[in-house]
Amino acid sequence: MSASIDQAFIKQYQAEVQEAYQRQGSKLRPTVRSKTEVRGASTIFQKVGRGTAAAKARNGVVPVMNLDHSNVECFLQDYYAGDWVDRMDELKTNMDERQVAANAGAYALGRKTDELIIAAFDSATAEAVGTATGQTDNDGLTRAKVLLAFEMLGEADVPDDGQRYAVVGWKQWSELLQIQEFANAQYVGNDELPWKGTQAKRWLGALWVPHSGLTKNATLRYCYFYHKTAIGHAAAAEITTDVTWHGDRAAHFVNTMMSQGAVLVDGTGVVRMRAKE
């Protein structure tokens, strides 16, 4: 009887952890280029340059674009989040407590996923700030700074194909809500207003999302306007859970783990917006 109870506990716990990670574990993973089922300690993301079209003479040879092919290597790292679940607590039918523990492990690894992606963002060099543009580090996330980042992506021929995203801190989200073009339905349209149940909305052809984990350097918060293909995320092992019984502790040890990595694939597709906070 006890063995079957343990199996039911293990299967349900694993399902709860995976569900929690998929639901709220990572906010940024869906916004970047993601590769799964990687085999090995690293993987390669291909990067292709721009081609140029040319005319040809009648019956002549079709001109070759001579595309610049390069690649970026993404290294993967293993991460773990473990905790003990006492058997006596489980026998008290505290189902909510198990769910809390499952969520904690999934959220911890979800935050780690976002940390990897944010570290890749931080390696980009293009910035919407400079004395020539009038945008400095002495102000927050202004309308002019956002429009400058928007212009920089356009000038770099970054596709405006519905796969642009922007991630900002919560302070900057509050500042954006003071911009009429961002907050007013007359500018944005009813269909583009914040999604039900979460803070995310479309503006300037991009999906804008607030995030609490963006890098803060002294008084400057690093926010980003980017294209999905500019950042590569790889997973060799998705969220998995191992539950083992330890008789000496009269408890299950729950180990949640994953193997993931992230890398900047194309720096022209990411623009940093530094905002004073």
Image: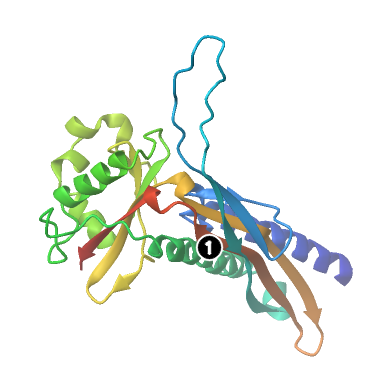
Q: Which residue is mark 1?
A: 113
Q: Position of residue 125 (x, y in %)?
A: 34, 60
Count residues near mark 1 (Cα–Cα under 10 Å), then give few for <14, some for 14-19, many for 20+: many
Q: Amino acid at mark 1?
A: Thr
Is 186 on the left-hand or right-hand side of 92?
left
Q: Nearer the viewer, residue 119 or 244?
A: 119
Tell me the quadrant of the picture where the C terminus can be found: bottom left
Q: Position of residue 42 (x, y in %)?
A: 66, 62
Above or below, comparing residue 187 to residue 96 in the picture: above
Is 98 on the left-hand or right-hand side of 111?
right
**Residue pictured at 14% horizontal, 57% vertical:** 135
Is 219 on the left-hand or right-hand side of 121?
left
Q: Is residue 194 visible?
A: no
Query: How many numbered badges does the structure rendering display?
Result: 1
Q: Position of residue 24 (x, y in %)?
A: 51, 56
Q: Nearer the viewer, residue 245 or 45?
A: 45
**Quadrant of res 223:** bottom left
